[in-house]
Image (cartoon, rainbow, N blue to C red):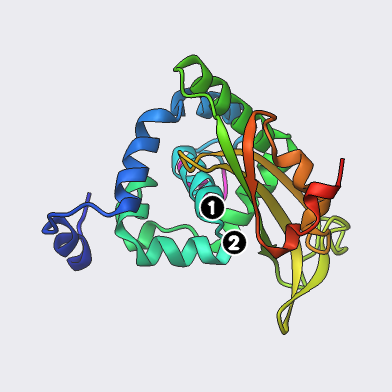
């Protein structure tokens, strides 16, 4: 693997960051081979005419980075350029191998099309349970907007009916929203729900719980959750 100047400087560091420690743990915990087998039948094959697909394992690892760090497709591309530990986790050898945001978007759409995103998380959580690492304690609920250009069209030349516009602060965004349930001790994502960007966070909160929580934490978007059934 060819090293950039930044990579060489990175290798000279002595102290591991929290991100490095977390990604090293995920390297060991996630059943990569099992998950790749789940996606492979639906993924484009190499050697076919046209543009060759990126390595499936790299795209899967980028997808998990997006979930763990709440990265939109453009933010994921930027993070891979900026962060050596993320590139190494994704098994990207150099900056010229970083996939662009459209490639990352297309992979996410492939997972959604075949209902694979949900299956991936179910497989990971089942694997954790078999290893005695089932999620207990509290859950942190949060939501992140996955923005897309307003000109994004489907294969019929129409705007995706599942995407909507929403306002956050003083800015408008068009796209979808990922609602995420995270174990407050391990930091592992155990539930993900995708909706249009204009869906209120609180309406999806009940879908983000595993049912064994002692506590549930969330920001002001979840105010009043305790009053709901």
Q: Main secondary structure of the magenta part?
A: loop
Find residue 213 and report its horizontal and vertical position in percent: 63, 34
Look at mark 2 in the image and give the residue it sits on.
72
Whichever of callouts 2 and 1 sits on the residue coming sooner in the sequence is 1
Is 74 located above or below residue 111 in the figure? Answer: below
Kindly identify which numbered label has been placed on residue 52: none
| Residue located farthest toward the bottom when viewing the structure as drawn | 170
Query: Can residue 115 be seen in the rendering of this structure?
Result: yes
Quadrant holding the C terminus: top right
Kindly identify which numbered label has been placed on residue 66: 1
Is 175 located above or below residue 103 in the figure? Answer: below
Q: In the depicted view, which residue is nearer to us: 132 or 113? A: 132
Q: In the depicted view, which residue is nearer to us: 44 or 150? A: 150
Q: Is residue 50 magenta?
A: yes
Find residue 64 and report its horizontal and vertical position in percent: 51, 44
Find residue 101 and report its horizontal and vertical position in percent: 56, 62
Residue at 48%, 43% (x, y): give it: 187
Find residue 93 and report its horizontal and vertical position in percent: 30, 52
Residue at 62%, 41% (x, y): give it: 215
Residue at 78%, 41% (x, y): give it: 206
Q: In the depicted view, which residue is nearer to us: 82 or 18? A: 18
Task: Identify the image quadrant of residue 144.
Answer: bottom right
Task: Identify the image quadrant of residue 157.
Answer: bottom right
Q: Which residues are magenta?
A: 49-55
Tell whether 112 sits left or right of 29. right
Q: Is residue 67 magenta?
A: no
Mark 2 touches mark 1? (CB < 8 Å)? yes
Tell whether 105 sits left or right of 11. right
Residue at 21%, 60% (x, y): give it: 7
Secondary structure beneath dot 1 equals: helix
């Amino acid at each position: 693997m060819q090293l950039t100047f930044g990579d060489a400087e990175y290798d000279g560091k002595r102290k591991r960051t929290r991100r490095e420690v977390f990604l090293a743990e995920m390297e060991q915990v996630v059943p990569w081979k099992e998950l790749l087998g789940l996606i492979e039948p639906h993924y484009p094959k190499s050697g076919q005419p046209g543009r060759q697909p990126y390595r499936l394992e790299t795209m899967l690892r980028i997808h998990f980075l997006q979930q763990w760090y709440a990265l939109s497709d453009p933010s994921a591309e930027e993070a891979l350029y900026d962060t050596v530990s993320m590139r190494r986790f994704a098994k990207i050898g150099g900056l010229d191998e970083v996939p662009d945001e459209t490639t990352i978007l297309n992979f996410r759409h492939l997972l959604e099309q075949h209902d694979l995103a949900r299956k991936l998380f179910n497989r990971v959580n089942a694997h954790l349970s078999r290893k005695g690492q089932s999620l207990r304690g509290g859950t942190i609920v949060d939501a992140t907007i996955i923005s897309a250009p307003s000109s994004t069209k489907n294969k019929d030349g129409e705007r995706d009916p599942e995407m909507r516009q929403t306002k956050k602060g003083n800015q408008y965004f068009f796209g979808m929203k990922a609602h995420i349930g995270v174990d407050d001790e391990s930091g592992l994502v155990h539930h993900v729900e995708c909706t249009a960007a204009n869906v209120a966070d609180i309406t999806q909160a009940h879908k983000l719980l595993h049912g064994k929580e002692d506590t549930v934490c969330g920001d002001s978007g979840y105010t009043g959750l305790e009053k709901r059934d």
